[in-house]
Amino acid sequence: EKGGYDTFMEKEIHEQPQAVGDTLLGRTDEDGRLVLDELRISEEQLKNVDRITIVACGTAAYAGMVAKYAIEHWTRIPVEVALAHEFRYCDPIVSERTLVVSISQSGETMDTLMAVKHARELGALTVSVCNTHGSTIPRESDAVLYTHAGPEIAVASTKAFLAQITACYVLGLYLAQLRGGSYADDAAAVLKDLHEVPDKIAELLGSMDRVQEIARFMADTRSVLFLGRHVGYPIAMEGALKLKELAYIHAEGFAAGELKHGPIALIEPGQPVFIVVPGPDTPHGLHGKVVSNIQEIRARGARTLVIAQEGDTAVEPFADEIIRVPATSPMLAPLLTVVPLQVFALHLSTAKGLDVDQPRNLAKSVTVE
Ligand code: F6R
């Protein structure tokens, strides 16, 4: 049942090219335009949306954070991401023109369900991004956009995360397409790149030996930091969460720009730090800014584990290890950069002799508030 892998998590990590591919499948017409009739929300209603709020917990919320950058950039509609348990009790501002997008693998997370019900009571239009057919959250929502990751057995989410990000991209690109003009043209170009991502993930999965080795040598590590920026910021937090869950190691993800506002005090000789580097063509010179961050922490003795695009030579002087990911457009990078972090957590957990699929104290779906 584990398809030749030692654990479900490892199997599910390897199913990620398919999870992304299947989530895209059947959602475009022969002209390459997105078709989302399955939503059963009229174009008029969607065009009326002036604000999007994403509600989710844990890894699904990090998918939401990635989606925020992408959807705002592609549509210019303001997007807010709220942890479902916070949203429910913070007197949220919601109107009939608000689209509340919930993200949940299981479709049973009580916190997320309560947030959706509350949003509906307040008159919002609700869409569920969900991996489980017939589960509660899609039933309680106005519409559903299923992720097609297949059943996820390992407690720690991997392939569902990639599928959630993909579904949110699809939704964002669809909204951009509805806006027409240059929005639609830009969306069409991104969609083309998105279709190439599954092959790139497969290629990346074939080059994870070094990551496995690094993890094996780090079995005694007590703390790992993760830095990212832009869409790499939620990926840094997801990398930290995977490590907490699977290897019971203290881990923290930061926005790289925050470093000098406090966290840099944590850097001491030997401190391992993963850095998710934006591609060199990311707007606003963010690549160069993150390279400077690597230089700063390296100068203070950090052990820098750098995740960088193929061909990015600027990171080389400051990296103790470079983990290469295939190049893609800046917004789509999370589908690649998260993979080595998942593999790292998996192998560190294994090196410590822990139960990868069933970490202590955790349940696959959290059906209590
Ligand atoms: C992390 C993890 C959790 C879930 C969270 C939401 O690996 O699995 O953080 O992402 O509990 O679960 P769903 O997506 O089922 O609502």
Image (tube, rainbow, N blue to C red):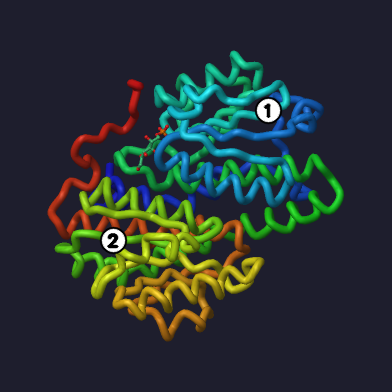
Give the left or right position of residue 316, taking residue 193 as reference. left
Amino acid under disc 2 = Val
Choose top left, top right, bottom left or bottom right for residue 186. bottom right
| Residue visible at 29% across and 54% down in the picture | 251
Spatial CA span between label 1 and label 2: 38 Å
Name the residue: 58% across, 32% down.
101
Task: Tell me if the residue at label 1 has its CB under 8 Å from ligand 1.
Answer: no
- The residue under label 2 is 224
Q: First in sequence, mark 1 or 2: give its number.
A: 1
Circle 2 SS class = strand
Q: Eyeballing the image, is 16 above or below 262?
A: above
Q: x, y (%) of residue 32?
A: 74, 50
In front of the other: 127 or 320: 320
Residue 161 placement (x, y as % from top left): 45, 45
347 relative to 161, above or below:
below
| Left or right, 10 with reference to 83 | left
Name the residue tied to disc 1: 98
Instruction: Describe the element under mark 1 as helix, strand or loop.
Output: strand
Residue 292 at x, y percent in the picture: 49, 76
Splitting the image into four quadrants, where does ligand 1 fall?
A: top left
Q: Position of residue 194 (x, y in %)?
A: 62, 55
Outermost residue toward the right in this view: 181
Disc 1 marks which amino acid? Thr
Q: Residues within 10 Å of mark 2 (few under 14, many from 20)?
A: many
Residue shown at 72% from the left, 41% from the top:
77
